[in-house]
Image (spheres, grey):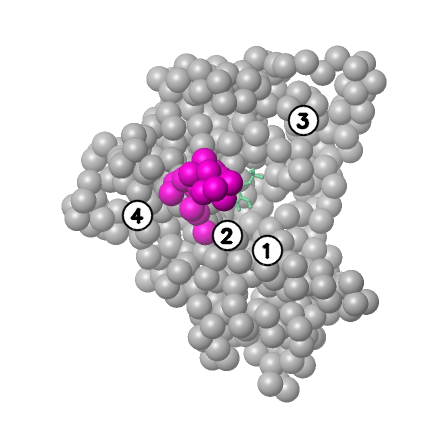
């Protein structure tokens, strides 16, 4: 009886039935090895090892001492919105009015707000495959339909105008989401291609969302913001990656004018406001750019170690290592089951990486993602361990 009642009252909704993140299994296995005293090199986690800028931490400490940590305006602290707007002028030479900046709880909440403000249930939104899994899982949970567009070397690992229009002809799209630098591929879209893609999407009435969370971590060429090409694009960004502030949960959105008020109403109802302490820290983070540039140079060195070292270790096929801190390696010479490959590499070589199936249900079986956000010593050790392991197995 009790069980029947519970079943009737607490059955999870179909929309909550989103897939888990496989990398969590790798992380649990790595933790078990470490609990036994083993040493694991962590290349599975997509977060910086470095702390937030000192300026951000100092601002948060000072604010804590005042004890005055109340709600803020739903769109964010005015000084932070103004500072973010100034960042577009300084970094990209683009004027973005502070009124268009919305502070969000990490970029993750930015996606929820943007999708709710832009789309109706049933709308179809194009995303790249491989791509960051929460794009499609958030869309599904909101009743929208993610449409996966395969990307490959032939399309320089990005959604092309042709692929977008072809998908749109098959069944109309309401939106498209592009990230550059991207996760898991670490690839970037060239500014000209970005501009063409935005124009093509907007020409067909397809709303454009640009995930710029890895901006600042660009090595192949400077990343360009979609704000340069359109006032109608929705831009999502975050303090998590370049500013090393993952746990502070603070990001932002550049919204088209017509979307600011709807997003404000949503944020008022869904969250009231973004954690105040994190907003105060974020406003001060921009003063820590020198520190963050030093962290970035560390990633560049790590990238060099892997790009030069992995081929000699046996992993000689990977995507262009343009930006972010990811290297997406083709492991098909060794296995067609990236989950099993990652598991064995962890158990036998002590190197943790993320199986591609998290990012691409089809070809992800043949890829593994390495994060190079750790130390140079760890990168050198990883190359050496992988080489020894692959030669042995
Ligand atoms: C491509 C991409 N977008 C968004 C996020 C979400 O980050 P956050 O919510 O910390 O801003 C991540 C996190 O790994 C990511 O890789």
Q: Nearer the viewer, mark 4 or mark 2?
A: 2
For the residue carrying disc 2, how many other residues have a C-alpha within 10 Å: few (<14), some (14-19), or many (20+)?
Answer: few
- Residue bearing the label numbered 4: 147
1 or 4: tag closer to the N-terminus? 1
- Residue bearing the label numbered 1: 24
Q: Which mark is residue 20?
A: 2
Q: CA distance from mark 3 to mark 2?
A: 28 Å
For the residue carrying disc 3, how many other residues have a C-alpha within 10 Å: few (<14), some (14-19), or many (20+)?
Answer: many
For the residue carrying disc 1, how many other residues have a C-alpha within 10 Å: few (<14), some (14-19), or many (20+)?
Answer: few
Residue at image point 61% right, 38% down: 240
**Residue 25 horizontal side relative to residue 163, left or right:** right
Q: Which mark is residue 278?
A: 3
Q: Tags 1 and 4 in contact by the CB under 8 Å rule?
A: no
The residue range painted magenta reads 1-20
Q: CA distance from mark 1 to mark 4?
A: 25 Å
Q: Nearer the viewer, mark 1 or mark 4?
A: 1
């Amino acid at each position: 009886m009790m069980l029947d009642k519970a079943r009737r009252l607490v059955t999870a909704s179909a929309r909550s039935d989103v897939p888990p993140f496989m990398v969590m299994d790798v992380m649990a296995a790595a933790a078990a090895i470490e609990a036994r005293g083993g040493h694991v090199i962590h290349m599975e986690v997509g977060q910086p090892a470095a702390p937030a800028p000192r300026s951000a931490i100092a601002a948060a400490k000072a604010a804590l001492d005042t004890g005055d940590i109340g709600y803020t305006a739903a769109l964010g602290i005015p000084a932070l919105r103004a500072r973010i707007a100034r960042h577009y002028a300084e970094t990209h030479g683009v004027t973005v009015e502070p009124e268009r900046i919305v502070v969000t709880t990490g970029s993750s909440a930015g996606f929820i707000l943007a999708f709710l403000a832009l789309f109706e249930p049933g709308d179809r939104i194009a995303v790249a495959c491989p791509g960051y899994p929460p794009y499609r899982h958030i869309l599904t949970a909101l009743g929208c339909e993610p449409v996966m567009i395969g990307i490959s070397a032939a399309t320089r690992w990005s959604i092309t105008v042709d692929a977008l229009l072809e998908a749109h002809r098959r069944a109309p799209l309401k939106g498209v989401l592009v990230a550059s630098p991207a996760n898991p591929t670490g690839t970037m879209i060239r500014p000209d291609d970005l501009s063409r893609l935005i124009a093509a999407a907007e020409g067909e009435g397809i709303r454009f969302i640009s995930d710029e969370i890895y901006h600042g971590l660009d090595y192949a060429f400077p990343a360009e913001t979609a704000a340069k090409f359109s006032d109608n694009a929705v831009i999502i960004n975050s303090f998590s990656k370049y500013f090393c502030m993952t746990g502070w949960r603070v990001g932002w959105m550049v919204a088209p004018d017509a979307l600011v008020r709807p997003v404000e109403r949503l944020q008022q109802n869904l969250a009231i406001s973004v954690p105040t302490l994190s907003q105060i820290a974020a406003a001060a983070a921009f003063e820590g750019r020198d520190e963050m540039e030093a962290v970035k140079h560390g990633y560049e060195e790590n990238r060099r170690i892997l790009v030069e070292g992995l081929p000699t270790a046996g992993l000689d096929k990977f995507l262009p290592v343009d930006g972010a801190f990811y290297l997406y390696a083709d492991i098909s010479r060794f296995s067609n089951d990236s989950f099993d490959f990652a598991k064995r590499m962890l158990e036998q070589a002590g190197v943790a990486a993320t199986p591609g199936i998290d990012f691409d249900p089809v070809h992800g079986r043949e890829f593994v993602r390495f994060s190079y956000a750790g130390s140079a010593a760890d990168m050198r050790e990883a190359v050496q361990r992988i080489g020894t392991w692959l030669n042995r197995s």
